[in-house]
Image (cartoon, rainbow, N blue to C red):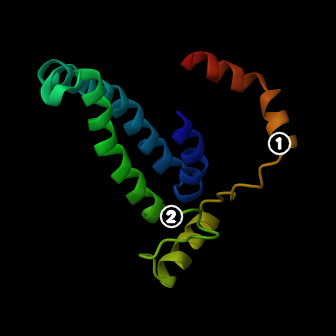
Amino acid sequence: MLVRIRADPLEGSWYTGPELFKRAGTWFICNPLGTMVSGYLQAAAYTNLSGVGGMPGWRWLFIIDGIFTIPVALIGFFIFPGIPGSPRPFYMTDRDVVLAKERTVRAKIRQPGKMSLDVFKRTLKRWHIWVFISCYA
C-alpha cells in the first residue's frame, strides 16, 4: 500500500486520463490474482521446504520473499523515472524528456506540488480520504 501512495502521483504525471484509467484497471484486476497465486506458492514453499536445511517453513518464506524483493527494489531504484519535469533515468534521451513534457502539456496534466505539513493536514480533513481508507481497512 505504501508503494501505491508514492507511485500514484508519479503515474498521474506521466499518463493521460484514459491511459491512467486503463493502467489502474489492469492493476486492480491483476493485484488480487497475484495475491492468490502468491498464496498458493507460499503454501507450497511452507509445506515442501519445512525442515530443509534445519529451518522451519516460515523462515524459508522470508528468505524467498527477500530473494525476489531485494533485486526488484534495486532495479526499481535505478529505472524509476521520477516526474517529467525532472526525470532522472539514464535511459531517457533529451528527445524523450521533451516528448514527455509536451505530452503532459497537451493532456493538461499538472505536476505534483510540494508536500508540506499544511497540505498533509488539509488532506486528512477531507472525507474522501477516510472513505478510501475505510475501504481498505
Residue 129: mark: none
Q: Quadrant of residue 26?
A: top left
Determine which residue is flagged by label 1: 119
Outermost residue toward the right?
Answer: 118
Q: Earlier in the sequence, mark 1 or mark 2?
A: 2
Q: Residue at x 37, y 31 (%)?
A: 31
The quarter in which the C terminus is drawn is: top right
- Residue type at the position of mark 1: Val
Q: Viewer-proximal residue, 30 or 120?
A: 120
Q: Residue at x 29, y 22 (%)?
A: 58
Neighbours of disc 2 within 10 Å: few (<14), some (14-19), many (20+)? some
Q: Residue at x 59, y 63 (%)?
A: 83
Which amino acid type is shown beneath numbered disc 2?
Pro
Q: Position of residue 124 (x, y in %)?
A: 78, 29
Callout 1: SS = helix
All told, the count of numbered labels is: 2
Looking at this view, is 110 or 40 the one in front?
A: 40
Identify the residue position indicated by label 2 in the image: 81
Identify the residue at the far bottom of this view: 94
In percent of width and height, residue 17 lies at 54, 49
Q: Position of residue 113 (x, y in %)?
A: 75, 55
Element type at mark 2:
loop
Q: Residue at x 67, y 19 (%)?
A: 131
